[in-house]
Amino acid sequence: MTIPNARFVKATNASKEYITNNISSCLAIGVLQSKWLIGITVLLLLIGGCVLLLERISIRKNKDVKGQQIKTLELNIALLKGDINKLSTEKEWLVAEMHHRVKNNLQVLSSLINSQLSFTDDKTGREVLFYSKHRLYALSLVHQKLFQQATGAAIEMSCCIKEVVDYLIDEFECAERITFDLNLVPITIDPDTAIPFALIINELATNSLKYAFPNEAGGKITITLLHLQVGTYRLMFADNGIGLPEGFDFLSAKSLGKTLIMGLSRQIRGAVTVNTVSGFEVIIDFKTKTDQQAHFVFC
């Protein structure tokens, strides 16, 4: 069937108009969608930028807070160190003062014993007081050395041994007939070891001066202090006197001097060996809590 020309043209124009309108609508929708997309993208970028900015601000604030916390912590540490140093100084002063007072009290006791000796005629009583005074001197000397050390943590023993020997030489008035040969390594030991060690030296030297050289005989006493290994030392005490009586067993003897020597040796974790072949010799291997050798010592 053939469409009349006018109607064909009208239909064609209507189709073109429809297509044009559809295309315009699509383009309008596309432009609108593009604008929305651009808007959303820009908004997201703005939001992301704000989040990033806030994050940077938060990080900076955290850094500032942490920096302030570190400064506060450092200040607190400095204050604590100051308090610790102050307490340490006060402790050292208190320890030194304690040793000073103990030394003074022991010297007072020694003076009282000297006074008592002047009024005691009994021979046995005088001997007890005489030898007790020597023990008090050994104790007093250690506390004096600890006071002079200020910290009270350790004492140099070779000087202490020399002073004990010099004191006993004066007390027994034997400088012209008895010589002391001292071979001592410098050793710095803790007070718990120094006090019994000084008393051991006093007991051994007193025993030799009292018994080894009768009738004003002359002789020699040798004291040797050796470093065996870390924390372990050897004390060798020997005299060339008359030795022990035949059949006399020093280790089983019931005497105050022997009891003190054995008991004090246990306090310093010592092993005691006695040799009576020629004169009298005692060897004590003992341990210290610290192993500090002093290389330069001025007594």
Image (cartoon, rainbow, N blue to C red):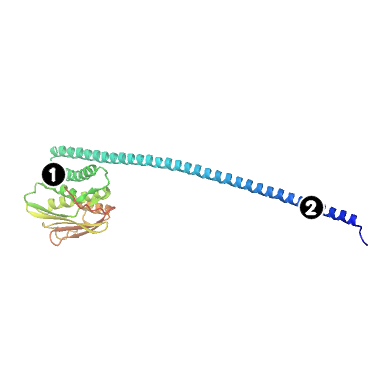
Number of numbered discs: 2
How crowded pointer 2 is (Cα within 10 Å; few <14, some 14-19, many 20+) is rated as few
Mark 2, residue position: 20
Q: Marks 1 and 2: which is nearer the front?
A: 2
Disc 1 residue type (three-letter): Lys
Q: Nearer the viewer, residue 179 or 5?
A: 5
Q: Quadrant of the N terminus?
A: bottom right
Q: Nearer the viewer, residue 191 or 25?
A: 25
Say which element carries label 2: helix
Q: Furthest-right residue in view? A: 1
Residue 256 in sight from this viewpoint: no
Residue at image position (25%, 48%) is 154
129 to 235, vertically: above or below: above
Q: Position of residue 3 (x, y in %)?
A: 91, 59
Measured in 3D between alpha carbons, the distance from the residue under mark 1 to the one under mark 2, in whole angstroms, is 147 Å
Q: Which mark is residue 282?
A: none
Say which element carries label 1: helix
Residue 171 in sight from this viewpoint: yes
**Do the numbered discs 1 and 2 sit on residues whose CB atoms are within 8 Å?**
no
Disc 2 residue type (three-letter): Thr
Q: Furthest-front residue in view? A: 5
| Among the two numbered marks 1 and 2 on one chain, the one whose residue lies closer to the N terminus | 2
Q: Position of residue 251 (x, y in %)?
A: 22, 57
- The answer to which quarter of the image holds residue 55 is top right
Q: Position of residue 89 (x, y in %)?
A: 30, 40
Q: Position of residue 281 (x, y in %)?
A: 16, 58
How crowded pointer 1 is (Cα within 10 Å; few <14, some 14-19, many 20+) is rated as few
Q: Which mark is residue 123?
A: 1
